Image: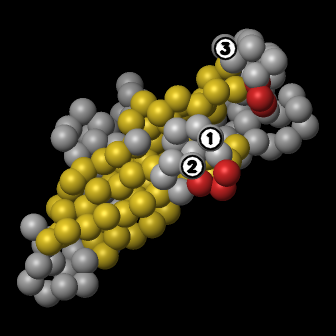
Amino acid sequence: FSCFTGDRTYYTDVIQLQNTTATESWDVTLTIEDGVQGATTTPATTTTFADTAADGSDADIWLFTSVADSTTPVTSNPNPGNYGSLADWQDAAAPDGAIQLEVTDTTPAAAGGVSLTAVSTTTGPFTVPAGEQRQLALVVDCGANMNDEAGTANTGTFNLTVAATPT
């Protein structure tokens, strides 16, 4: 995913979770993986966030799951915080939750000048009824001061485990 300075970016159809069974509902849990690609942080990510100044820059990253069947794609954007509605998306305040990561300034001596905080790394379980599917959406808020001071783009990658069990 990319972080565009001062903007909120929506990736509204990142993954579709499809229950292809005709009679069985499934409880699904999403978890950010630890230690992938040689990372030593939890959660493990690969990032090129390059803000090296302690200027209040930050980026917030959310992963949401649609509440309703997305056989017909959900067309509303998930709007966390004070920005709007989560009517079609699992609410972070609900038991099903959302994944949230936060990139914040550290001292310039820190690797890359930023740190990654896992606000929540697991969702669910949430139910995907027989024959239905759920749409995953990624929302990335990039602070007005977050920029590519080191000459690289503000991008990030994280790996996600999808676990499912019959209800």
Viewer-proximal residue, 37 or 57? 37
133 vs 8: above or below: below
Kind of residue at badge 3 = Gly
Q: Residue at x 85, y 41 (%)?
A: 152
What whole-number distance in Å separates the C-alpha atoms at marks 2 and 3?
A: 28 Å
Disc 1 is placed on an element classified as loop
* Coordinates of residue 105 in the picture (x, y in percent): 68, 19
Image quadrant where one finds the C terminus: bottom left
94 vs 144: above or below: below
Question: Disc 2 marks which residue?
Answer: 35
- Asked which quadrant contains residue 111, the reply is top right
Viewer-proximal residue, 16 or 25? 25
Disc 2 is placed on an element classified as loop
Asked if marks 2 and 1 touch (Cβ < 8 Å), the reply is yes
Kind of residue at badge 1 = Thr
Res 12 visible: no
* Badge 2 or badge 1: first in the primary sequence: 2
Kind of residue at badge 2 = Gly
What whole-number distance in Å separates the C-alpha atoms at marks 1 and 3?
A: 25 Å
Q: Which mark is residue 40?
A: 1
Q: In the visual, does 108 lie left or right of 13?
A: right
- What is the number of callouts on the image? 3
Q: In the visual, does 68 lie left or right of 7?
A: left
What whole-number distance in Å separates the C-alpha atoms at marks 2 and 1?
A: 6 Å
- Asked which quadrant contains residue 78, the reply is top left
Q: Which mark is residue 94?
A: none
Disc 3 is placed on an element classified as loop
Question: Disc 3 marks which residue?
Answer: 56
* Badge 1 or badge 3: first in the primary sequence: 1
Q: Residue at x 39, y 70 (%)?
A: 16
* Badge 2 or badge 3: first in the primary sequence: 2
